[in-house]
Amino acid sequence: MEEFMNISEEHQQDIAEYGRTIICIIDEQNSEVNRWSYSIGNSISENPTPELLCFFPHRHTVSWVLNQLSDSLRLEEIKPLSPGEVVEVRGVLGDLKEFPLLLKYLTPDEQRYCWDNFTYRLSPDVPVMQVEIPDTAGYYSHEPGSPSQHVEGHTPDRLAITTKPDRCITNLWGAPKNPVNVNALRDNLRYLVDILADSEDTHTEATLDFLFYLAQQEFNFDANGYGEASDADEEQAHHSCTIGYVQALLNYRDSLEWINEESSPFSPYGEDSDLQRYWYNIKPTAKDLQGELADEFNGPHHQINYECPDAFCADLNWQTIRWAIKFTYDNSLDAGKTMEHRIFWKTTRMEDLTAEEIQQHKEFLDKDIAAAKAAKKQNRFTISWLKNKIKSLFSK
C-alpha cells in the first residue's frame, strides 16, 4: 500500500477485509467530536474512486455516510465528477430522508492544501472528494442562522462549498417508506393532536392549531384535489406532495428557503406561501395582510388566544412539531395502529364507522378485555399472596 503513508496494521487489515478504512482525527478537547475524517482504500479498489474527506463532527454519522458513498461510487450509482464540480444528493439522511449531502471533487490546488493539512496519510496525487453533511436544521458549516449550530464553522473557509450544485441526485439509497394508505398520516396526526390536547404536559394553542391544520388540510386526501385523470394518479399525487411537505417541515433551512421563493417549482406550499410565512416567523409583506391570512387569524378563536399573528408564531413550539410529525409518520407505516387511531378519532366525535372499522373496533375491544383479565389474574399472585398461602398451608 505504497499510495498511503503511516498506516497502522489495524487500518491495513480493514482495507484488506472491507476495501477501505476511515481515519478519524479526534478533537483534543473533546474525544466525542471529530475534527475531520477521511477514507483510505477507495483509490486502490478494482474500480478506483476518489477518497472522501469530511469535517462533520459526529463520528457515527460521518463513518456511515463515507462508507455508503464509497460503495455508491464503486457501484457507479454516482456518475464521475470532474474537478471543481459540486453535486447535491437529496433524500439520504434524517428520519424521513429530509436532509441532503453536498459532494465536491477537489481541484488540484484544494487537493494539495488538504494533503498539507488534513489527508497527509494519502499520497498527494490521490484524488479526493469532499463531503458536506448538514446539521439537524439542514444548515451547512458555512451557513449562519441555524438554530442547531453544532456544525457551524467546522469546515475550513477555504473548503466551504458555497456554489450552487451543478447537478442533483435523488433517492440514492431508497425512497422513504410509504404509509399504509392515502390518509394514514392524517389519521395518526388527528389522534396525536387529541392526545396532546388532553395530556398533563402543557402544549401551546398555536402548536396544536398548526398540527390540526396539517391533519385537516395538508395530510387529508379528502380535502385536496390534484387534477389527475384517475383515482390512482390522484392518490399518487397526494402521496408525493405529502411526503415532500413532511420532509420540508422537518428541514428548517429548506422550509425557509422554499417559502421565500414563492415561484419555486419545488415549493410544497403553492398558493398558501403567504400564510406559511407566519408559521416560520418570517417578516411579512404588505400582501400578507390580505385574503386567507386575514381569514385564518381574524377568527374568534385566534382573537381570544392571540392578539396578532406574530403572537401566534412566537407561541409555536418547533421541537414539538418535529416530534409529532416523526411520530405520525412512524405510525403511518403500521396498519394496525393507523386503524386504531382512525377509530379513536371517529368514536370520540360520534362519527359513523364503516363495516370494516366496526369489526376492527370489536377486535380491539376484545383484545383489551383479554389483556385486562390477564393482568388482573397475574396481580393475584404477588409475593404477599404467596407468603400468606404458604402460611395457611403449614397452619393446617
Image: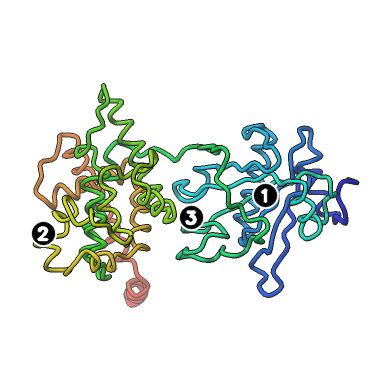
Instruction: Look at the picture and state if 209 lies above or below 232.
Output: below
Quarter of the rendering containing residue 318: bottom left
- In the current view of this chain or complex, which residue is farthest to the right? 2
- Nearer to us in this view, 377 or 138: 138
- Nearer to us in this view, 61 or 305: 305
Mark 1 or mark 3, earlier in chain: 1
SS state under label 3? loop
Q: Is residue 369 visible?
A: no
SS state under label 1? strand
The label shown at residue 299 is 2
Mark 2 or mark 3, earlier in chain: 3
Check disc 1 and report the residue beneath it. 130
Instruction: Look at the picture and state if 107 lies above or below 196.
Output: above
- The residues bearing labels 2 and 1 have C-alpha atoms spaced at a distance of 51 Å
Please indicate whether residue 142 sits to the left or right of residue 256 in the image.
right
- Nearer to us in this view, 34 or 146: 146
Q: Residue at x 23, y 57 (%)?
A: 286
In which quadrant is the C terminus drawn? bottom left
Instruction: Name the residue type under label 2.
Output: Gly
Q: Residue at x 39, y 54 (%)?
A: 256
Check disc 3 and report the residue beneath it. 138
- The residues bearing labels 1 and 3 have C-alpha atoms spaced at a distance of 18 Å
Q: Is residue 3 visible?
A: yes
Counting other residues with Cα less than 10 Å from the Cα at mark 1, is it few (<14), some (14-19), or many (20 or more)? many
- The residues bearing labels 2 and 3 have C-alpha atoms spaced at a distance of 34 Å
Q: Residue at x 19, y 35 (%)?
A: 356
